C-alpha cells in the first residue's frame, strides 16, 4: 500500500567520522541506485538535545551537507534538507509524545549511555524524548525503510511501536511500519582506542576516530596507533571471533574496499599489523581524500549549500505537510 521510500538522518553535532561514512553516508548514496525515493535530513533539532554553540552548529550543518554531497548523495536525485526548516518534524513529534509511553522511553539504551556517569536529572527533556522526534522524522514521510547503523536499531523499533499504537488507537492504517536497513560489514564501526565502544564524533579522544576531514598523515598515524593484539591476522573470519580490535580493522577494510571479510582475510591472512595497518591507511586515504577535497570545495561557497538545503526543505515540506494535516484530522483536530 505504501510507496517504498527511504528516510535517514545525521546529527550536525560535530565533524563526521568514518563510522558515519561507512554506516550511513556511503549507504545513503548507494540507495539512490535502487530505484527508490530517498530523503536525507540533517537533524539539527536532535543535535540541540545537548547544548550547541550557535555559530558552530550553523557551520557544522553546512559541513554535514557538504559531506553528504561529497559522499555521493545527489541533491537532484535525493531530497537533502535541514530538519528545523520543515516545521512538521517538531509538530508530529508532539503528537507522538502523546502516543509513546514513558515506559518505552525508559528502556532506550542510548539515553542511558549518553547520561552514564553524569547527572541524568540535569539532561534536557529533549534528550529523553529524542526517539519520539526520530519517529516523527521517519513517519512524517511515510518512509518504509530506514538505513542506519546498529546503534539506531532500538530507535527504529520504537518508531514501529509508535506507528502501530497510533494505528491501533485511532483505528486506522495511516502510518506504515518502517523497516530498519542494517546491512554490510560496517554497521558498527568501533573506536580505534577501545574495541568495546562505537566510533563516535562525540568521543572526547580524537585518536579514537577517523574524521572525514583528516589528512593522509593523520589517518596513517591514527591507524598506526590503533589498539590491537600482537597476533597476525587469521585466514578465516572465525579466527576474529574473540579479537574485537582486529575484527574492527578488518571490517573497516572490507567496507572500504567493497570486499567480504573472507576475501580480505584470503589476501591478508598471516599478516601482522605492522603490514596490515599501513595497507588499511592507504586504502582509507584513497577513499577519503577525494571526499574531503570535495567537501572543502563545497564549503568555499556556503550560500550555494544554503540554497541546496532550502530547495530540499521545500520538496520535503510538500510531502510532509499533507501527512501532518491528515494526522491532525485523524486525531480530531
Ligand atoms: P554519532 O553517533 O556519530 O553522533 P549520529 O547519531 O548522527 O552519529 O548517527 C548518524 C548515522 O551514523 C546513524 O545511522 C548511525 O547509526 C550511524 N553511525 C554513527 N556512528 C556509527 C558507527 N560507529 N558505525 C556505524 N554507523 C554509525
Ligand atoms: Na548515534
Image (cartoon, rainbow, N blue to C red):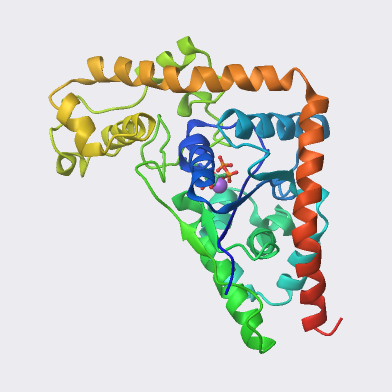
Taking depth in this image into account, of 189 and 40 the one nearest to the observer is 40
Taking depth in this image into account, of 46 and 116 the one nearest to the observer is 46
Q: Going by the image, does 64 lie left or right of 270?
A: right
**77 over 182 or under it: above or below:** above
**3 over 33 or under it: above or below:** below
**250 over 45 or under it: above or below:** above
Residue 321 coordinates in the image, percent (x, y): 81, 63
Please give the name of the residue rendered at 29% of the width and 39% of the height, measured from the top-left corner. Answer: 244
Residue 214 coordinates in the image, percent (x, y): 54, 18
Q: Quadrant of residue 324?
A: bottom right
Q: Going by the image, does 331 lie left or right of 179?
A: right
Report if residue 225 is visible in the image: no
Determine the residue located farthest toward the right in the rendered image. Answer: 333
Please give the name of the residue rendered at 39% of the width and 41% of the height, measured from the top-left corner. Answer: 186
Q: Quadrant of residue 275?
A: top left
Q: Quadrant of residue 36?
A: bottom right
Determine the residue located farthest toward the bottom in the rendered image. Answer: 171
- Locate the C terminus and report the quarter of the image it occupies: bottom right
Determine the residue located farthest toward the top in the rendered image. Answer: 217
Please give the name of the residue rendered at 66% of the width and 89% of the height, measured from the top-left corner. Answer: 171
Numbered marks: total? 0
Taking depth in this image into account, of 167 and 90 the one nearest to the observer is 167
Residue 79 coordinates in the image, percent (x, y): 68, 46
Amino acid at each position: 500500500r505504501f510507496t517504498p521510500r527511504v528516510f535517514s538522518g545525521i546529527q550536525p553535532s560535530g565533524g563526521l567520522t568514518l563510522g558515519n561514512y561507512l554506516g550511513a553516508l556511503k549507504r545513503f548514496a548507494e540507495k539512490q541506485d535502487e530505484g527508490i525515493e530517498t530523503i536525507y535530513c540533517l537533524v539539527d533539532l536532535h543535535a540541540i538535545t545537548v547544548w550547541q554553540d550557535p555559530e558552530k552548529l550553523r557551520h557544522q550543518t553546512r559541513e554535514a551537507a557538504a559531506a553528504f554531497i561529497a559522499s555521493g548523495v545527489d541533491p537532484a536525485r535525493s531530497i537533502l534538507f535541514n530538519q528545523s526548516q520543515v516545521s512538521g518534524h517538531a509538530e508530529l513529534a508532539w503528537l507522538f509524545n502523546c502516543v509513546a509511553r514513558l515506559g518505552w522511553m525508559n528502556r532506550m539504551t542510548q539515553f542511558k549511555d549518553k547520561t552514564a556517569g553524569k547527572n541524568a536529572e540535569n539532561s534536557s527533556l529533549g534528550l529523553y524524548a529524542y526517539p519520539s522526534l526520530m519517529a516523527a522524522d521517519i513517519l512524517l514521510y511515510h518512509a518504509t525503510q530506514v538505513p542506519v547503523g546498529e546503534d539506531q536499531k532500538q530507535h527504529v523499533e520504537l518508531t514501529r511501536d509508535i506507528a502501530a499504537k497510533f494505528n491501533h488507537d485511532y483505528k486506522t492504517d495511516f502510518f506504515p511500519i518502517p523497516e530498519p536497513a542494517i546491512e554490510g560489514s560496517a554497521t558498527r564501526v568501533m573506536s580505534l582506542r577501545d574495541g568495546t565502544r562505537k566510533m563516535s564524533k562525540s568521543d572526547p579522544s580524537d585518536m579514537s576516530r577517523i574524521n572525514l576531514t583528516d589528512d593522509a598523515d593523520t589517518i596513517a598515524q591514527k591507524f598506526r596507533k590503533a589498539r590491537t593484539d600482537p597476533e597476525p591476522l587469521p585466514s578465516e573470519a572465525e579466527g576474529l571471533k574473540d579479537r574485537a580490535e582486529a575484527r574492527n580493522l578488518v571490517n573497516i577494510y572490507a567496507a572500504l574496499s567493497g570486499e567480504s571479510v573472507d576475501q580480505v582475510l584470503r589476501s591478508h591472512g598471516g599478516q601482522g599489523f605492522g603490514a596490515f595497518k599501513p595497507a588499511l591507511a592507504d586504502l582509507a586515504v584513497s577513499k577519503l581524500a577525494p571526499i574531503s577535497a570535495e567537501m572543502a570545495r563545497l564549503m568555499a561557497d556556503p550560500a550555494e549549500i544554503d540554497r541546496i538545503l532550502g530547495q530540499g526543505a521545500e520538496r520535503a515540506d510538500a510531502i510532509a505537510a499533507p501527512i501532518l494535516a491528515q494526522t491532525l484530522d485523524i486525531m480530531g483536530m
